[in-house]
Image (tube, rainbow, N blue to C red):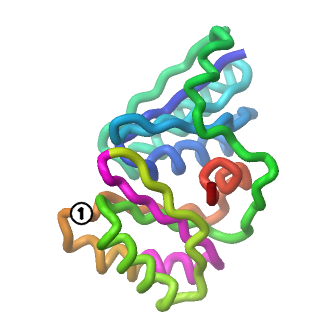
Amino acid sequence: MAIGMVEVEGVAGIIAAADAACKSAQVELLGWDSIGGFTTVFFSGSVSDVGAALRSGEEAARQVAKKVVGAALNQPEPAIRQYVTLPVNKDAPIIPGALGLLETQGYGLQLLADDRMVKAAQVEVASVLTVHNRVVCSLIVGEVGAVKEALNVGRELASGSAKFLTSAFIPRPVPQLFQAFGRR
């Protein structure tokens, strides 16, 4: 048994990491935590599966975030699980469709972008996550084309501002993403 962790500044990077990790190996998404503007996603499985998932997760996170740190704990002490303060909610609904992520610093630009995205295409804001350092990440869902269109509108609006952090598109997210990062 092993636990893998990917840590980034912001939130979008760990969502991309979690999706890639779960797609690349037989791992269980445990949840995530945030402290001081950095977030960490946790997953568990065999040593070899966690190693493969960690490599994929780090690579995916680097597409979205600048600062990425990954680590594996082989035969971790049970107390390590206390760091997963936002565990996967297995009772949460799983939302079908593509997933778009738009991340900014502060609510002002984020709310304007969310409003424009839902007006531009047939998408829904499935969740808005906030973490330390005023990082705000919206998760939008819908059909692939609609999410791409909405994300382009949001990115176009936000990218001219110093408050824009990043965006990402996941055409077929693993269902556990919504259980981990959905509405709380």
- Residue 85, by quadrant, is top right
Residue 35 vertical position relative to residue 66 in the rendered view, above or below: above
Q: Residue at x 20, y 73 (%)?
A: 160
Task: Give the quadrant of residue 72.
Answer: top right
Residue 25 in percent (x, y) is at: 70, 35
36 or 45: nearer the viewer: 36
User: Is residue 52 magenta-colored?
Assistant: no
Look at the image and tell me in which quarter the C terminus lies: bottom right
Residue type indicated by callout 1: Lys
84 is higher (above) or lower (below) than 175: above
Reading the image, the residue beneath label 1 is 163
Q: Is residue 83 left or right of residue 137?
A: right
Q: Residue furthest right?
A: 91
Q: Residue at x 20, y 70 (%)?
A: 161
Q: Which residues are magenta?
A: 133-151
Marks counted in the figure total: 1
Residue 51, horizontal then vertical, whole percent: 60, 24
Q: Dot 1 lies on which element?
A: loop
